[in-house]
Image (cartoon, grey):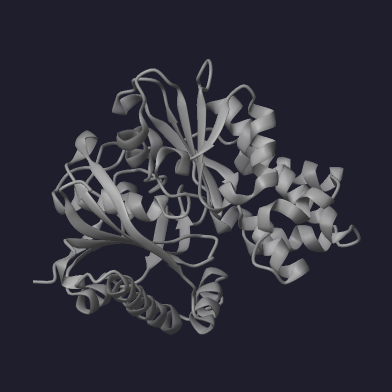
Amino acid sequence: MNEGKLACGIMSGTSLDGIDVAIASISGLGIDTKIELITAKTFPYPEKILELVKKAIENKATVREVSSINFELGKLYGECVLELCKSVGIESSNLSFVASHGQTIYHQGVKDAYLNPSTLQLGAGAVIAELVKTDVIYDFRVRDMAAGGQGAPLVPYVDYILFTHKTKNRILQNIGGISNITVLPKNANEAEVFAFDTGPGNMMINHAMEVLFDKPYDDGGKVASKGRLIDALYDEIKSHPFLEKLPPKSAGREQFGVEYTDSLLKKYKNYSKEDLIHTLTYATAKTMVDAIKRYSKLESIDELIVSGGGAKNTYLMKFLETKLYPTKVLTSEDLNLSIDFKEALAFIVLGNQTINRQTSTIPSTTGANKKVISGSVVYYK
């Protein structure tokens, strides 16, 4: 283990499939950062809180309810940290800090005809701090947006310091609710790194599985592998305007969430359930491949390193391997970084930068006019 300090990262993503909590040892700053996972666990959302979160995301919650959710999530996150600490005999007050992404309720990366760019992640940092009895960094996206960026993606900075290789062109792909990539040219400096959201990840597939099969996800892509392509549905997804936008760009439930997916399921309801899942999976994977080929700017890609829940979808992974051949398709696990907890660990790295007053954003990935120190800090003492 590196001779570092103990810290905790919390990530609850757009797929709403649980709360990832990781405790790690971290040392150094910037390119000299070293991090080693000690323990991690995914905690399920209690049904009542999950329904409230969904209600808020779907713009059906009152201001009173949204305010309440903010505090409820803070309490829940804090309790998850306490439970994980207890499981390995760590006093929570011995954590140097907790870095919490929070639950995204709304994210609009660019101005439209009606509204300015904005973002909202819930999970009150002060509530976490009081429970865990240590400093908490939260609300990571706002500062970048204040500097003209889209507030996403933020993980590319972490990808850069942990995965840049002297002789290999690499792309890091995280497949959560949304799919995003970080492009790392060989021997890259920070200015050469760029990243963006490619489009849907697990979001559409998971929702369709819930509606059609009453299951949270397609285990290993088994359902998708039994279906056939619905050409009209595939063409409709591929014509989504987000996919034609040039990077930097970020996506969320506003583009590929419940409302959009439900409209497709309703329109193509006469097709078999397996064909629907197959087509959603195929189209989702194709958006990833197309984005990599169109926008990566690399003459060749030596390695695609996949993390997130999508890395467990065997059907999707085989699609990436076939369409991107001869690129070697790996998972982050192959490079000793957890598939499931990569983003929770990433926020420990970002929190470590923040607590030490160091920048942790890459303007070329978010579109901001400068590098910033991201996150708000609640000091326990």
Which residue occupies 38% across, 76% down? 73
Q: Quadrant of residue 231?
A: top right
Which residue occupies 67% across, 58% down? 219
Which residue occupies 46% across, 44% down? 333
Quarter holding the C terminus? bottom left
Q: Is residue 6 left or right of residue 287?
A: left
Residue 12 lies, in percent from the top left, at 44, 63
Which residue occupies 43% across, 49% down? 338
Residue 112 lies, in percent from the top left, at 51, 50
Residue ranking furthest to the top: 299
Task: Work out whether residue 29 or residue 126 is closer to the camera in this orientation and state it.
Answer: 29
Asked if residue 288 is positioned above or below residue 70 in the image, the reply reads: above
Residue 143 in sight from this viewpoint: no
Q: Is residue 291 left or right of residue 70?
A: right
Residue 318 lies, in percent from the top left, at 68, 38
Asked if residue 9 is positioned above or below residue 45 in the image, the reply reads: above
Number of numbered callouts drawn:
0
Q: Is residue 115 left or right of residue 190?
A: right
Residue 296 lies, in percent from the top left, at 52, 26
Residue ranking furthest to the right: 270
Residue 214 in sight from this viewpoint: yes
Q: Quadrant of residue 54?
A: bottom right
Asked if residue 30 is positioned above or below residue 310 in the image, the reply reads: above
